[in-house]
Image (spheres, rainbow, N blue to C red):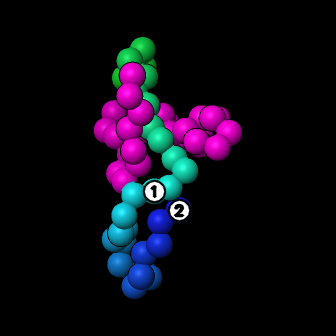
Amino acid sequence: MATNPPKGDNHRQGAVKDRTQVHNPKTDTWVKRDTDSGRFMDQKQDGTPFKGVRKEKP
């Protein structure tokens, strides 16, 4: 994950590494994927993309 000094200010500097996100049109949600293993990790419920995570090309 990205480093965030100073700690505790809820501010990320730079992108999250080793993660991508892809849009699932069937459920209209964004799904986060680990780039090393290719496994799906997490899914957003509100329909907005993850912050700081790179998007995959369809």
Query: Which x, y percent locates residue 19?
Result: 51, 47
Q: Element type at marker 2?
A: loop
- Residue 1: mark in rendering: 2
Confirm whether residue 45 shows in the render.
Answer: no
Vertical relation: 48 (above or below) 17:
above
Residue 46: name its quadrant. top left
For image coordinates 47% across by 41% down, the residue present is 20
Q: Residue furthest bottom?
A: 6
Which portion, as a residue range, is magenta? Answer: 30-58
Q: Main secondary structure of the magenta part?
A: loop
Vertical relation: 16 (above or below) 29:
below
Residue 58: name its quadrant. top left
Question: Do the residues bearing badges 2 and 1 touch, measured as CB atoms within 8 Å?
Answer: yes
For image coordinates 41% across by 33% down, the residue present is 56
Binning the other alpha carbons within 10 Å of mark 1 as few (below 14), some (14 to 19) or many (20 upward) gives some
- Residue 16: mark in rendering: 1
At label 1, the amino acid type is: Val
The count of marks equals 2
Residue 48: name its quadrant. top left
Residue 50 sits inside the magenta stretch: yes
